[in-house]
């Protein structure tokens, strides 16, 4: 089975791998050009929006609907600022004005109760050709009086067939589906009306040919419409209720498909895929010694996570575990002990982190620890000199280095491990699935542990990480101090500086962080550099300041970070490079400049850099108006709580599903119909059903249609069925 995270398409669109074969009439794999009213030319146009087959067409779903409840008679238009829709017939149209009067295109529309003008000042050429006298249209927009005439400027236009128009106005109230069609398609007559006409033909052609693949007992239990009915109702709803039922079915179908794939993959990994079975760590062995050597007692939470990990590592199939723990919950110690388990078992372990600064910090901190245990560790990052790099590569390929800490550099082609048994990926959301896969391919199906500091609401974790097992680290080890979070404006900077001085005088340290947004990297850099130079000779001249940013040479960055962690600097001014993982318990203040420009989880991470030692912390979020309401929401959320799980939920609420973590880029299943956030209840159900189904019958033998669906959707490449 391919290890990609892509879900099978919900529709059975892929042609069979075994060359062309005659399709039955109405088979969903029929090419669109064979649908009545679609010729080769239309087919090419449809191709532009990804519609190649009848199945693709039927799954091209409406973006919204027009129904009676939205339509206002012209004589009842209120002139408030509200968007309304008017349905009527085109009386006439033409170009007006020119010279001193603005040139414009006007359409007169009547619905029998009054007259409304649609007015365009732009795109005149296009609009002139768009209308025909007597045609039925819907105008949506804001109506207003202008020179005693009721008009809408630049209304959204939807063309209707006559019966559609009549249906909309009739008591029975037809519901008209509106499709995402885009300007390109609209220009060639493939607007919503055009698509509705083709869709009607398509549904007609597919009648009786739309295979049901959901297990009947599940459909019954959740009162789901059949696939055929659902598609019919989504495109041509009988009622709003039926339309909703149709959508619910299609969403369930999509989520169920994705989850069955994940369940099959998990099953295969657990039962079929050969991985390393590590020996159980011995009493008094390396792992036990390492635990003893830690400067603290592991918490119960850490121990229980380590037990999960140990069991996975002992098992003969590859581990695939996600460890979610809030900032400061002590994930690093867990990772280190897991690395020792690997070493004790005679394997190499790799820890991959997102930044060079962090890789170095980890290496610096833990190298002496490893050394004392007789374990050789190597650092591999992009910024190494030629000699150092060659040495690291040699140590990795010879197996001399039992622990390897590094960045993306670890997944480059040249890097060869001798016996890679465990891969730990820190701060998961920075890595794509593809990268994870590459690292994994460096070993013979090594065990994989993924660490993330940004807690993800369970339902989302299940979709994003699908077949991963999940461990939680809830508590934060002792001595963690509460952090006071304050929202301030840049006018308060003087007061903030005064506060910093007081802290410095007490021997504490502080961070001052500037945002780093790629688009304006120079400007941001400048802000940090200027602040450094200004404070250096001005308000903070008595104190020891350091500056780090992405443009510094590695050694320079390293030197400054090292100074800061040793307590040789009072204030570290930085661009957002310190975001992840830096651990300086003596730092008590985090000042975030232009805080409105950071994401919520980023801010939470930054705040997590302080309050790590015995002293309480203060986090000042410096933000100036104007800022978006989302930005305001983010800052308020931080002010209200320190709980990473609450913050993650809030982040979801503010950003919505699609954008969370930019899941798209990171290989999460790409839902086309369902929204994993808005539909999370349904998602939980679909997931449960899918995993139950696979557990009971991993070969899907008693679900021939489901099995056929997967075979067809994935083609033979999937080898999906070999799990059975
Ligand atoms: P994160 O989960 O954010 O990576 P770290 O691993 O950096 O957290 O740990 C945060 C801080 O807590 C570090 O200073 C670490 O040394 C300390 N720490 C970790 N585990 C324990 C423990 N069991 N008892 C006391 N302190 C601990
Ligand atoms: Mg960490």
Image (cartoon, grey):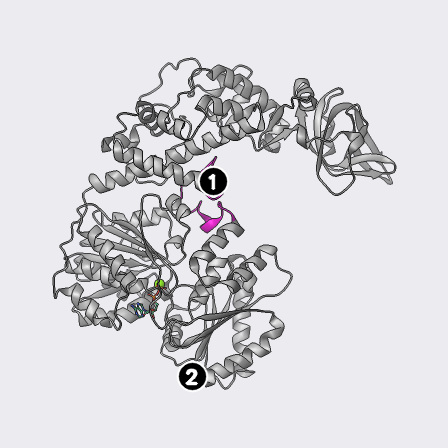
Cβ of mark 2 under 8 A from ligand 1: no
Whether residue 598 is in magenta: the answer is no
Which residue is located at x 34 percent, y 35 percent? 690
Tag 2 near tag 1, CB within 8 Å: no
From the viewer's side, name the closer residue of 135 and 289.
289
Which residue is located at x 45 percent, y 65 percent? 606
> Does residue 551 appear in this view?
no
Q: Which residue carries the number 1 mark?
A: 679
Vertical placement of residue 614 versus 13, above or below: below
Q: From the viewer's perspective, is 674 left or right of 109?
A: left
Which residue is located at x 52 percent, y 82 percent? 540
- Mark sitting earlier along the chain (2/1): 2
Residue 469, horizontal then vertical, whole percent? 30, 48
Residue 143, horizontal then vertical, whole percent? 77, 37
Q: Which residue carries the number 2 mark?
A: 507
From the viewer's side, name the closer residue of 319 and 645.
645
Vertical placement of residue 583 versus 433, above or below: below
Q: Quadrant of residue 309?
A: bottom left
> Does residue 401 appear in this view?
yes
Which segment did they paint magenta? 656-680
């Amino acid at each position: 089975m391919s290890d990609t995270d892509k879900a099978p398409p919900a529709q059975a669109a892929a042609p069979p791998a075994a060359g062309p074969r005659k399709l039955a009439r109405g088979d969903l794999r029929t090419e669109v050009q064979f649908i009545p009213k679609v010729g080769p030319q239309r087919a090419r146009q449809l191709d532009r929006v990804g519609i190649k087959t009848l199945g693709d067409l039927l799954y091209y779903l409406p973006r919204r609907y027009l129904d009676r409840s939205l339509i206002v008679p012209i004589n009842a238009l209120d002139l408030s600022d509200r968007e309304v829709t008017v349905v009527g017939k085109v009386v006439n149209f033409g170009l007006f004005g020119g010279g001193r009067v603005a040139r414009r295109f006007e359409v007169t529309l009547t619905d029998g109760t009054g007259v409304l003008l649609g007015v365009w000042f732009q795109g005149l050429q296009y609009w002139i050709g768009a209308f025909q006298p007597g045609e039925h249209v819907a105008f949506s927009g804001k109506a207003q009086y202008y020179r005693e005439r009721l008009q809408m400027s630049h209304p959204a236009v939807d063309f209707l067939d006559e019966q559609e128009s009549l249906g909309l106005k009739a008591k029975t109230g037809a519901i008209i589906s509106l499709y995402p069609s885009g300007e390109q398609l609209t220009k060639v007559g493939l607007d919503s009306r055009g698509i509705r006409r083709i869709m009607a033909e398509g549904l007609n052609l597919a009648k009786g040919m739309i295979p049901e693949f959901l297990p009947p007992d599940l459909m019954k239990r959740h009162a789901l419409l059949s696939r055929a009915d659902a598609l019919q109702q989504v495109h041509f709803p009988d009622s709003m209720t039926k339309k909703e039922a149709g959508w619910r079915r299609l969403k369930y179908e999509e989520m169920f498909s994705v989850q069955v794939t994940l369940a099959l993959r998990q099953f295969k990994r657990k039962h079929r895929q050969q991985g390393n079975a590590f020996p159980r760590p011995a009493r008094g062995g390396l792992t036990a010694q390492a635990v003893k050597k830690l400067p603290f007692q592991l918490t119960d939470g850490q121990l229980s996570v380590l037990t999960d990990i140990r069991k996975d590592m002992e098992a003969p199939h590859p581990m695939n575990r996600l460890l979610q723990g809030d900032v400061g919950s002590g994930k690093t110690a867990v990772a280190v002990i897991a690395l020792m388990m690997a070493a004790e078992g005679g394997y190499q372990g790799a820890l991959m982190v997102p930044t060079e600064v962090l890789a170095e910090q980890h290496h610096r901190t833990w190298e002496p620890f490893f050394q004392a245990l007789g374990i050789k560790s190597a650092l591999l990052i992009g910024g190494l000199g030629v000699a150092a790099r060659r040495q690291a590569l040699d140590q990795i390929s010879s197996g001399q280095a039992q622990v390897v800490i590094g960045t993306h550099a670890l997944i480059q082609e040249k890097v060869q491990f001798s016996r890679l048994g465990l891969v730990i990926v820190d701060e998961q959301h920075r890595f794509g699935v593809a990268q994870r896969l590459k690292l994994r391919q460096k070993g013979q199906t090594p065990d994989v542990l993924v660490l993330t500091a940004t807690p993800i609401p369970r339902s989302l974790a299940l979709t994003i990480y699908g077949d991963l097992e999940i461990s939680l680290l809830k508590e934060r080890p002792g001595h963690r101090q509460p952090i006071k979070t304050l929202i301030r404006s840049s006018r308060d900077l003087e007061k903030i500086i005064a506060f910093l001085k007081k802290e410095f005088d007490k021997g504490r340290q502080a961070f001052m962080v500037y945002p780093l947004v790629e688009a304006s990297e120079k400007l941001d850099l400048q802000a940090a550099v200027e602040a450094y130079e200004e404070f250096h000779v001005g308000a903070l001249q008595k104190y020891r300041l350091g500056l780090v940013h992405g443009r510094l040479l590695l050694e320079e960055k390293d030197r400054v970070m090292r100074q800061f962690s040793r307590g040789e600097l009072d204030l570290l001014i930085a661009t957002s490079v310190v975001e992840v993982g830096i651990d300086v318990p003596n730092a008590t203040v985090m000042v975030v400049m232009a805080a409105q420009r950071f994401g919520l989880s980023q801010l939470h991470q930054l705040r997590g850099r302080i309050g790590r030692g015995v002293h309480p912390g203060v986090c000042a979020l410096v933000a100036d108006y104007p800022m978006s309401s989302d930005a305001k929401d983010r800052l308020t959320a931080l002010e209200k709580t320190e709980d990473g799980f609450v913050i993650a939920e809030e982040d979801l609420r503010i950003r919505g599903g699609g954008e969370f973590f930019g899941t798209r880029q990171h290989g999460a299943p790409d839902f086309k119909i369902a929204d994993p956030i808005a539909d999370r209840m349904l998602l939980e159900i679909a997931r449960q059903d899918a995993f139950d189904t696979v557990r009971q019958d991993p070969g899907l033998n008693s679900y021939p249609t489901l099995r056929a669906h997967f075979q067809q959707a994935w083609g033979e490449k999937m080898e999906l069925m070999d799990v059975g």
